[in-house]
Amino acid sequence: MTAPITITVVDKTATHVRAIRGCRNPAGAWQLEDAPNAATPPLGGEFEFPLTLKVQDAKGNIMKMRVQRGVAQPELSRKKVDPR
């Protein structure tokens, strides 16, 4: 069984948004659960992008990712090309 992980999410102002714990089961799927605490605002709370995800495993390895809100881009039209 893979060591458990902890995912911490903070916003631009370093406000704690969410904490999630996860364990991997023998079938290879992850089981995630909220780790609520007093600093966790309700899900509809105010927070500012970009968000930072900090993932840490039981060995102390840390991976950080930054999440930004993107602008929707129009899809490119796809034309079928005759291979002849």
Image: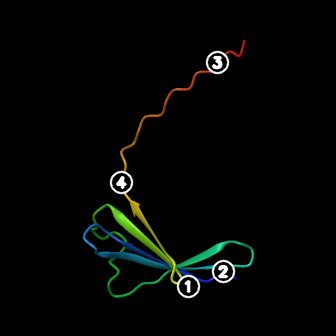
Residue type at mark 1?
Lys
Extreme residue toward the top, this view: 84
Corner quadrant of residue 32: bottom right
Q: Which residue is mark 4?
A: 69
Residue nearest the viewer, comparing 31 with 50: 50
Mark 1 or mark 2: whose residue is earlier in sequence? 2
Does the CB distance between marks 3 and 2 fall below 8 Å? no
Q: Position of residue 65 (x, y in %)?
A: 43, 64
- The answer to whether the residue labelled 3 contacts the one labelled 4, judged by CB atoms less than 8 Å apart, is no
SS type, badge 3: loop
**Label 1 vs label 4, nearer the camera:** 1
Q: CA–CA distance between discs 3 and 1?
A: 52 Å
Position of residue 51 measured from the top left corner of the image (x, y, whole percent): 35, 65
Q: What residue is rendered at 51% in x and 83% in y?
A: 60
State the residue position of label 1: 59
Q: Amino acid at mark 4?
A: Arg
Q: Residue at coordinates 28% horizontally, 75% vertically from top-left?
A: 15
In the foreground, 71 or 44: 71
- Disc 2 marks a residue whose amino acid type is Thr
Mark nearest the camera among 2 and 4 is: 2
Instruction: Report which residue position mark 2 lands on.
Output: 2
Considering only vertical position in the picture, is 28 above or below 36?
above
